[in-house]
Amino acid sequence: MTIEYKINHSITTEQFLTLLKACTLGERRPVDDIPCLEGMLANSNLIVSAWSGERLVGIARSLTDFHYACYLSDLAVSEDYQKLGIGKQLQILTQMQLGPKCKLILIAAPTANEYYRQIGFSHNPRCWVLERDASVG
């Protein structure tokens, strides 16, 4: 099986949605909100994707300034392509696009904590989240 990796290659909302539904990340993403998915793709400034022929099988979708911080918002690999090193390669290629001082930051699903620790990430307990229906006050 040959996997081709692409940087900032055009991805349709349908391809993104199909991938999300083919992995557990779809449980935590707005798969019923097409305008939101469209915005997620359109406003990401670094997307590394993995393809098996014409099929999108993996994605690392990030927001970054390329110099100090890169927030890896989505890392997804289709369940039938997992455990082949695709997720790790997506992260390696993401990091290769960044400057020498740029940190890679992500919020992991609880079940993925050990995976990230195993590949070299350090745990940071200082993350805070303000949900959209909450107000700063």
Image: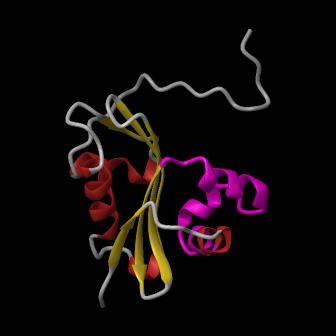
Question: Magenta stretch?
Answer: 18-45
Front position in the image: 44 or 92: 44
Q: Residue at x 69, y 57 (%)?
A: 37
Q: Residue at x 33, y 78 (%)?
A: 4
Front position in the image: 133 or 41: 41
For the N terminus, the quadrant is bottom left
In the rendered view, tell whether residue 58 sits above or below residue 131: below
Q: Position of residue 104 (x, y in %)?
A: 33, 39
Front position in the image: 3 or 97: 97
Prevailing secondary structure class for the magenta stretch in the rendered image: helix
Q: Position of residue 47 (x, y in %)?
A: 45, 57
Q: Is residue 49 magenta?
A: no
Badge count: 0
Q: Position of residue 67 (x, y in %)?
A: 32, 31
Q: Is residue 40 magenta?
A: yes
Q: Residue at x 56, y 68 (%)?
A: 11
Answer left or right for 20 relative to 117.
Answer: right
Q: Residue at x 71, y 62 (%)?
A: 31
Q: Position of residue 45 (x, y in %)?
A: 49, 47
For the C terminus, the quadrant is top right
Residue found at the far top of this picture: 137
Answer left or right for 40 relative to 102.
Answer: right
User: Hey, which quadrant is residue 136 in on the image?
Assistant: top right
In the rendered view, tell whether residue 2 sits above or below residue 84: below
Display coloring: secondary structure
Answer left or right for 123 relative to 34.
Answer: left
In the rendered view, tell whether residue 78 sits above or below residue 75: below
